[in-house]
Amino acid sequence: MPAKAIREPHVAVSELNLKKTALRILGQRLVSPEVAYIQRTLGATATQKELDASVTAVRKMPWAKIVQPE
C-alpha cells in the first residue's frame, strides 16, 4: 500500500500572520516595508515554513532590495 503524502496547509500571507510569525521567531516586529516585501514575494498564501523562512531572510537582506523605488 503506497504511503500518503502529507500536505502542509497554506495560510494567508497577511500583515497579522507576518506579525505573529516575526514575534515568534525574531522576538520583534517587522517594519512595513519588510511586510510589503514578503507579501510581494510570497503572494496571497504560503505554508508556515515558507513564512518562517521569508521572515528570517528579510532581516538579513540589504535595505535597498527590500524597499521599492518611488
Image (cartoon, rainbow, N blue to C red):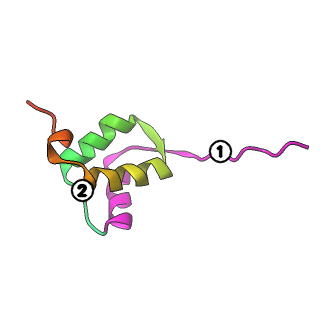
Membership of 8 in magenta stretch: yes
Give me the disc on residue 7: 1
Membership of 25 in magenta stretch: yes
Q: What residue do we see at 24% from left, 49% from top?
A: 61
Q: Which residues are magenta?
A: 1-26
The residue tagged 2 is 30
Q: Secondary structure at mark 2?
A: loop
Which quadrant holds residue 20?
bottom left
Q: What residue do we see at 45% from left, 39% from top?
A: 45
Q: Secondary structure at mark 1?
A: loop
Which quadrant holds residue 7?
top right
User: Residue 32, image x and y in percent?
Assistant: 19, 48
- Position of 4 with respect to 50 (left or right) is right
Q: Amino acid at mark 1?
A: Arg
Residue closer to the observer: 62 or 23: 62
Q: Quadrant of the C terminus?
A: top left
Residue closer to the observer: 20 or 53: 53
Give me the disc on residue 61: none
Q: Sequence-wise, which precedes: disc 2 or disc 1?
A: 1
Q: Amino acid at mark 2?
A: Leu
Q: Quadrant of the N terminus?
A: top right
Q: What residue do we see at 34% from left, 56% from top?
A: 56
Vertical placement of residue 30 versus 36, above or below: below
User: Residue 12, image x and y in percent?
Assistant: 43, 43
Real-space Cα separation, disc 2 to disc 1, in angstroms: 28 Å
Q: Residues within 10 Å of mark 2 (few under 14, many from 20)?
A: many
Vertical placement of residue 25 versus 31, above or below: below
User: Residue 3, image x and y in percent?
Assistant: 82, 46
